[in-house]
Amino acid sequence: MNHEKTLQAFFDNQIVGMMEVNAAGKYLQVNDQWARMTGYSASEITATDFQSLTHPEDLPRQIVLDHELITGKINSYRMDKRYIRKDGSFFWGDLSVTGLYEDDGTLTGMVGLVVDITQRKQGEAALATSEVRFRTIIDNLEHIPVQGYDENHRIIYWNTASTDLYGYSKEEAIGKKIEDLIIPLQMREEVVESIQHWLAEDHPIASRKSILRDKEGNDIPVFSSHIMHTTPSGAKELFCVDIDLRMLQQAEKQLLRLAVAIEQSGEAIVITDPEGVIEYVNPTFTAITGYTQTEAIGEEPCILSSGEHSDAVYAELWDTITQGKTWKGRFINKKKDGSFYTEKATISPVIDTTGAIVNYIAIKRDITEQLLTEEKYRHSQKMEAVGQLAGGVAHDFNNMLAIILGQVEIALIKIQPGDPLEKRLQEIRLAANRSSNLTQQLLGFARKQSRQPQVLNLNDTVANMLIMLKRLIGENLELRWIAGAEVAFVDIDPSHFDQILTNLIINARDAIDNNGVISVKTEDVVLDKNFCLDHPGCYSGEYVLLSITDTGCGMTQEVMEKIFDPFFTTKGIGKGTGLGLSMVFGLIKQNNGYILVDSTPGEGSTFNIYFPLVQIEKEKKATVSNSGILVRGSETVLIVEDESSLLDITINMLTEAGYKVLSAHGPFAAIQQAEKYKGSIDLLLTDIVMPKMNGVELSEYLVKIKPELKILYMSGYPKKHFNQLRQHNTSAQLLKKPFSLYKLTQKVREVLDSTEHHQS
């Protein structure tokens, strides 16, 4: 047998790549399998060296091993490395290299065997990637703590959620025994027994609720599930997943709150199935419609139909919500008792995770009262606009009347007594004077008459007026007077009140045919916020109510909506101008009052007038406290004002009061004053609104120069600018323009005597 041929055949037919290289690393021969693995022919390979096909990243490591083999430090080595194929791709090989030596130990060559392990490496890489991905996911699970323990109960894994729940960092937890970390003392024996039972018999640990302990010693209610795992080496590991039951308890509470919110909502809430059959209504629905839950459930929303809407409205609604969209609009619906109401509705589909509509929910608000209030407000705005127009007309009309009367007076002087023109001129003057009275009524309606208010006892004033007014109403009418208000002090112009009461009494007289009664009474009342919400233009507080009631013909709703309009009258031609009630309305408003009318055809009318109550003791106190001319002082005050005339007046006022005054025409001049003034400045009195730098910015700058500086702002726009200022500095003080000498010196003294300084 030819052993050499046999060995060559064995060499060529191996399923692994084989090669022989000399001591210099040059290929001597390779087998066919190595040629196939690399894609090169045998001759191409033998023209290169041993390291030429090595991947650059693996080359340094092999150079080191080859050097150790040549120097005799090792006889062989094994490594995983990448080889570059002829087409440029690479594969992983498990390389085993053995050195060939002479008897004296000299290296003569090397034999290498390569097994293609590319698939194994890819699997390992995939496994490593999967493990990294798994660990990343577990590490970053929110609200799901996961821990791992070994057979000695020591923690080998601790994710971020565990740190969030129990307070221990990963570094603090790893290596600690689980029973020493988060298990309460009273549970430790039970937990250890469970783990030991699992180790001995591979018996699963049952999932259960328990109370564990965090780093701060707080009890943490959890639901724990355990997963057993055996490693390739046979070691046993136990992984535990905890669910923080506090989250579930919070979710339950949130659901309960949601249910309570729906039940207690001020909106009517209706839930139907996909076919539109009612499944739920809340108590507000019952309160509005009169239908109980039992009566409504199982019915369709059409039980509320009033017949006021066409079929097209409901068709459009249904088409919108069945397409998964939200419908918004208004309905005029009918309650169980048959009365109508208006509601604003939002109807939305409830869509599940598959995209199917499972319910419809309607949130509805009864806006009947809101619409009435809006209508009252629009009427109030209309009256305001008409009043402005009437005031403008009266102003222009008075100018023309002045010309007419002036010309008449001149003409009367020019003519001789007994002249036929005298009578005509007198008639012109009389007509002009009557017209002047009409313009006064227009000005009253427009609230343009001058007002000179006084604090009056309304009971005394009415009693005195009624003595005179009895002569106007005639003997066939009874005039009743009831002084019901105990405290009846109001702030009103006496002449205005006389006009108001006279017009209302005359109107009551004209509404009564033959015999009847006119009642006048006063009453102390308190108007709350709900009343004022329903009656725009009225403000909550204490009032004196003056009521004038007649037993006359009464008025329809249509008439009541117009009675305060100028020139509207139900009286016959020549019997009324239509300005009486218009003037009453304007004068009441001008004196901060409010009027309401209640009337029924055939049953008479009641006019209720509300005047704000005045506490007479407060009025007297205020009068005394304001009787002084000025409040004196001697401190240094820096006044900053960009209006020259007002700056001069303010300087004179404070100088007169004894203060040392520094002044500046604007903020930049004030800064220069403060910087060059060597003494102390006690108070900065500054306008808020000034060009380039406002008073607030100026005060903040000057406080840095003069830390003890106190600040008093002044402005002619107190609401707008002072509200903004108060948001910035809650202790800010303001003097409203225009101000008197007393108001100025009083406020300056108040700020100087205060203990608060500017807050920057």
Image: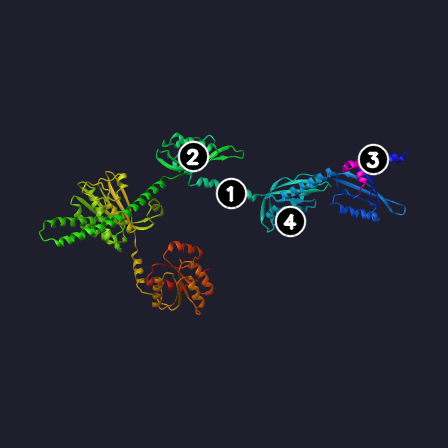
Residue segment shown in magenta: 30-49
Instruction: Check disc 4 and report the residue beneath it.
Output: 170
- Decide which of tag 2 and tag 4 comes sooner along the chain: 4
Task: For mark 3, give the secondary structure.
Answer: helix
Q: Nearer the viewer, mark 3 or mark 4?
A: 3
**Dot 2: element:** helix
Residue on which disc 2 sits: 293
Disc nearest the viewer among 2 and 4: 4
Tag 4: amino acid: Lys
Question: Disc number at residue 352?
Answer: none
> Which residue lies under the disc numbered 1?
253
Secondary structure at numbered mark 4? helix
Which of marks 2 and 3 precedes in the sequence? 3
At label 3, which amino acid type do we have? Asp
Of label 3 and label 4, which has the lower sequence position?
A: 3
Viewed as shown, does residue 748 lie left or right of 226?
Answer: left
* Residue 437 in view: yes
- Relative to residue 1, is residue 586 drawn left or right? left
Residue 43 magenta = yes
* Display colour scheme: rainbow
Classify 10 Å Cα crowding around label 2: few (below 14), some (14-19), many (20 and above): some
Decide: few, some or many residues near mark 1? Use Cα within 10 Å; few <14, some 14-19, many ≥20. few
**Residue most extreme to the right:** 1
Q: For the residue labelled by badge 1, is the local secondary structure a helix, a strand or a loop?
A: helix
Q: Nearer the viewer, mark 1 or mark 4?
A: 4
Disc 1 to disc 3, C-alpha distance:
78 Å
Tell me which secondary structure the magenta stretch mostly adopts.
helix
Determine which residue is flagged by label 3. 12
